[in-house]
Amino acid sequence: MMKGLHRFLSRGQNLFALAIVISYIFVAIAAPQLAPEENAKKLAARFELIPAARNTPQPPAQETPFGTIAITGITKQIDVYSNVIWGTRSALEFGLIVALSTALFGAIIGAASAYFGGIFNDIMMRITDAFLTFPIIVGVLFIQQLLSIILGPYFSMSALLSETPPPQPNLFIDLLSKINPLMLALILFSWMPYARVINAVVMRAKEMDYIKAARALGASHSRIILQHLLPNTISPAIVMAARDIGGVVILQATLTFIGLGGGSIWGAMLADGRRWIIGPGGNPLTYWWVFIPGTLALVLFGIGWNLLGDGLNEWLNPRTVNHLEM
């Protein structure tokens, strides 16, 4: 393990990936200090009072180092710097929750079905295959519609404006109202690759001597799966999860950009600034701050986690380690 860690840290690509990921984690943690929300509100209020600034992006200045973006249809400006900083926290939270949840869920299903084997494994793998054919975007739209149907009587505009007061939400309804439909859809429809990979690994591992010894000592099925099989077969899921953190955040930003929801701060910021990408005379750099900071934040986030996944694969994959040592 230490030899593999030394090899991991000796590669410049892995150090570059760690530097990017650690930088994003630092920014996410320090967001309240780096970009206090009160400052952004004050800036927005100040720009609303300046007629010339209402409908035109404002260039970088001392108070707005990345400039501002004018939102179409209302007299409001977005502080690009604040959105980049707070978008980092939002993206990291979204990526970690989705990737870790799908990895854990898929790993448990794959390990349990492989451990018990037989017809149970066949049924679970056919269910996994069925989920693999289901498009994620359709799942997002389905969950959005389902939540709107359930929550409509409580929070829809028509219910709030009607003469009859809407029913009071209970704890279950409050929890549903806080769910991000995209996050739920990705968790429900992205666990299958993890289940497939872990299933194949556990199929081989369950015949190992240490598993047979645990059975002979009377260990329960749950103990064997959780304490023996998963810890020794989880490496592929860790590598996949590291790569998926960047991927799901890019997908979230993309769906937010095209108007399918998702709640990505970076995606919403790029959507607000898209009509300013081409400036007067066809110059794409006239309002460069409306798309370059947000795009760089998104691209570097994806690159960092993907490179980290590649490095973890070299470190944790026994075949790769053996090949390098030869």
Image (spheres, rainbow, N blue to C red):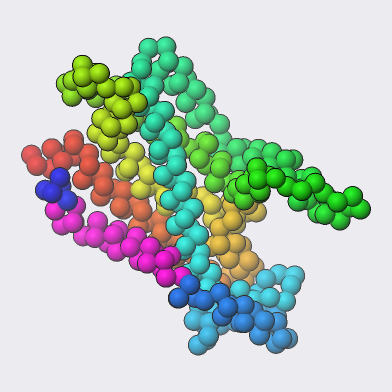
Q: Which residue occupies the extreme right position in the image?
A: 163
For the N terminus, the quadrant is top left
Query: From the viewer's perspective, is 284 left or right of 161?
Result: left
> Above or below — where is 108 with respect to 258?
above
Range shown magenta: 6-31
- 324 lies left or right of 228: left
User: Measuring 59% from the left and 49% from the top, which residue is drawn there?
Assistant: 180
Dominant secondary structure, magenta: helix
Find residue 101 and report its image quarter: top left
Total count of labels: 0
Tell me where residue 81 appears, x and y as whole percent: 51, 74
Is 296 in front, or is 221? 221
Q: Residue at x 28, y 39 (%)?
A: 235
Q: Is 270 situated above or below 53?
A: above
Residue at left offset 47%, top offset 26%: 128
Q: Left or right: 90 with respect to 241?
A: right
Magenta stretch encompasses residue 23: yes
User: Camera-side residue: 323 or 156?
Assistant: 156
Q: Position of residue 251 (x, y in %)?
A: 51, 50
The residue lying furthest to the top in this view is 119
Say above or below: 109 vs 97: above
- The C terminus lies in quadrant: top left
Q: Is residue 273 visible?
A: yes
Residue at the (80%, 46%) spot, across then down:
167
Q: Nearer the viewer, residue 49 or 255?
A: 49
* Whole-percent x, y for residue 136 in the image: 56, 39
